Amino acid sequence: MNIESICREFGISGEIVACDVIKSGNINDTFKVTFRDAGGDSCYIVQQINTHVFKDPVSMMQNISLVTGHIADKLGDASERMVLSFLKAKSGESCFFDDEGKCWRSYRFIDDSITFDLCDDAEILEQAGFAFGNFQTMLGDFEASKLFETIPDFHDTEKRMNTLFSHVEADPLGRAADAASEIEFFRENFERAVCLTRMQKDGKLPLRVTHNDTKCNNVLFDIRTKKALAVIDLDTVMPGLALHDYGDAVRFSANTAAEDEPDISRIRLDNNKFRAFTKGFLSAAGAVLTENEKEKLIDSVIVIAMELAGRFLDDYLTGDCYFKTDYPGHNLVRTRAQIALAKDIIARYDELDAIIKTLL
């Protein structure tokens, strides 16, 4: 089926006047389609869902429908530009399987919106923080257990650490010796790495709706005012910890270097970026976070940096099968970069925690 036929399955009418391939994103195939009728032009995003990555797209779309519907109900008339609005297929479902078994979905394009791949601007970062904080606030009364777990055990750091240690012992490719000091770091800081997982299992941290990919480019901004509009890329929305979303956002956005920077002397958490994102996040979510969540904000950045470092190292030890690599040892370089970030935050824990306390 062609794109126009797919659009008709979602009840889109009018004459198709443009169809552009959206190249950002490397999982789903995405198109921006413009239709024209007597009322003018209307734009829609049409996506073919990658079912190799998302093996249960129907459950995934049910998650998205529940979450976006809950937010839209709270926003009322403002929802048109503040939350994604997915179309129903003729079947009544939020996705459609064509004759070849490919899975499609569509949502209304939010006019006059823009995304930013890089967030060096403190105001943009603060707005991104606000967007993800507001996401938590809007869903603060949503029962997260209703959602399908898109990626099981995604942030079960203890399970990931134990898997890593088992692969260290097995050492299937004889690579463990290359990472002796990194492995020792994980052993020495195991309790720090698993603190959030254990607190959640002990009932000390609430299960919430989480985004699980809280990068700045997953926020739509108004093209004129640069104010945050909507959180997008909701495929990994599922039950989790708000701290994981916050920690991953800070880990990515406030790092002074890329997550595969080979020169670890360049790696540090930037205080200004950290402050900007945290200010926005807490201004929106501060009222719904528990005291335990607020106390563990800094810890969450360390946890996510360590968890990702562990995933990189595990992939290195087992043959580089998960993360794409550009050269031999790339995953080991990534491991060292994330450990360097974690070490910087640990060394400056009190300094960074003091910044948070000024924002609460």
Image (spheres, rainbow, N blue to C red):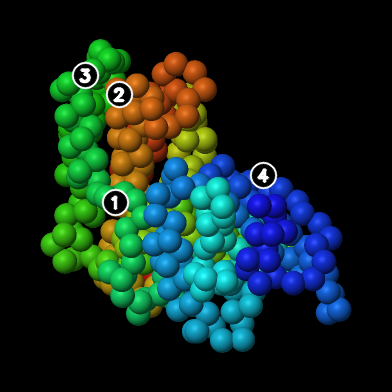
Q: Is residue 136 left or right of residue 124?
A: left
Give how far apart the Cα atoms at labels 3 and 2 are.
Answer: 8 Å
Tell me if residue 269 can be seen.
no
The numbered dot on residue 28 is none
Q: What residue is pinned by disc 3?
A: 171
Give how far apart the Cα atoms at labels 2 and 4 are.
Answer: 31 Å
Which comes sooner in the sequence, label 1 or label 4? 4
The numbered dot on residue 152 is 1
Q: What residue is pinned by disc 2?
A: 318
- Element carrying mark 2: helix
Q: Is residue 51 left or right of residue 241?
A: right
Give how far apart the Cα atoms at labels 1 and 2 are.
Answer: 20 Å
Extreme left residue here? Answer: 202
- Element carrying mark 3: loop
Give how far apart the Cα atoms at labels 4 and 3 are.
Answer: 38 Å
The numbered dot on residue 23 is 4
Identify the residue at horizontal 56%, vertical 42% (top origin). Answer: 26
Neighbour tally class for label 4: few under 14, some 14-19, many 20 plus, Cα within 10 Å: few
Residue type pointed to by label 4 = Lys
Which comes sooner in the sequence, label 3 or label 2? 3
Which comes sooner in the sequence, label 4 or label 3? 4
In the rendered image, residue 43, in percent from the top left (x then y), is placed at 74, 66
In the rendered image, residue 167, in percent from the top left (x then y), is placed at 21, 26
The quarter of the picture where the C terminus appears is bottom left
Q: Are marks 1 and 4 in contact (CB under 8 Å)?
A: no
In the rendered image, residue 20, in percent from the top left (x then y), is placed at 75, 51
Give how far apart the Cα atoms at labels 1 and 4 are.
Answer: 28 Å
Q: Are marks 4 and 3 in contact (CB under 8 Å)?
A: no
- Element carrying mark 1: loop
- Element carrying mark 4: loop
